[in-house]
Amino acid sequence: MNAFPNRLDRRIFLGSIAAAGAALVIPAPAHAQLGLSSILGKASDSALDKLAQPGAFYDDKDIRIGLPFIGKGGGLLGSIMGGASRLGLVDPFIRTLNSAAGTAAGEAKPIFRDAIDDISFDDVPGIIREGDGATQYLRSSSNDRLHGKLEPLVDTALGDLGAHGQLEKLNGKHSWMRAAGLDRAGLNKTVTDQGLDGIFTYIGREERGFRKNPFRNLF
């Protein structure tokens, strides 16, 4: 009796095993690449779905987006901003930034899928040995491209949620905000930078999960 359903594509089965770490079982690199691409695509979709949920960025302290001069060793200004943050003077603004990142993440699936489809896994054995090797490879090969595609989504989300207007009001009201020199372009960049860090953190987590169970969502 055949061990696999008749409709199961044997290449997908072999590729999934390869991506899970059983490189010695797969003689053809193309099979392993197929499995890595499939798992990475599923990991990115799942990560972006999770980050698109309300409060996802802000509620996770590991990826929460903050102003670039808070808690980054910014001298006197950094100390003032840190105190302002603790007093809640900029917390509503920071929540808006995190919400904007989540909105952008929810619209970013095609961007990440396109990037995944365009990469070639040249070092399949090396990638397989790392629990989040495909995620690391995607970032090393496509980070600048993804940043460029994500930033317009962030800009639109920040505008729709009123963050650019909030920034203008904060700059107008507080001298320590004006001294920081954060404008619309700088705000877009820092939210995109930190948002991309969070997205890759989540994709890596999802990849490790799919590797532990390579048949998840396969049938």
Image (cartoon, grey):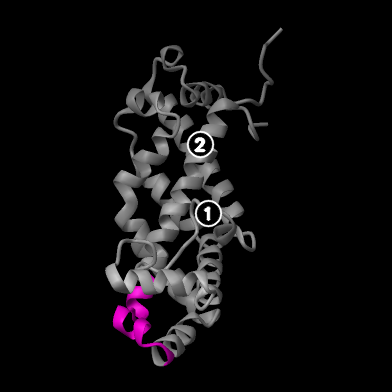
SS for tag 1? loop
- The amino acid sitting under disc 1 is Lys
The segment highlighted magenta reads 173-188
Give the left or right position of residue 114, taking residue 12 as reference. left
Name the residue carrying label 1.
Answer: 61
Q: Tell me the residue that label 2 is attached to.
A: 207
Mark 1 and mark 2: span between their CA atoms? Answer: 21 Å
Amino acid type of the residue that numbered disc 2 sits on in the rendered structure:
Glu
Residue, x 66% and y 17% (percent of image)? 4
Q: Position of residue 96 (x, y in %)?
A: 54, 73
Report the residue at 48% width, 71% height from top. Answer: 85
> Does 44 sit left or right of 183 as displayed?
right
Q: Determine if the magenta segment contains residue 47.
A: no
Q: Look at the magenta stretch and give its main secondary structure.
A: helix
Which is more toward the observer, 80 or 201?
80
Out of 9 and 148, give the one closest to the viewer: 148
- The residue drawn where x is 68% and y is 31% is 219
Question: Of callouts 1 and 2, which one flags the residue occurring earlier in the amino acid sequence?
Answer: 1
The image shows residue 9 at horizontal and vertical percentages of 58, 26
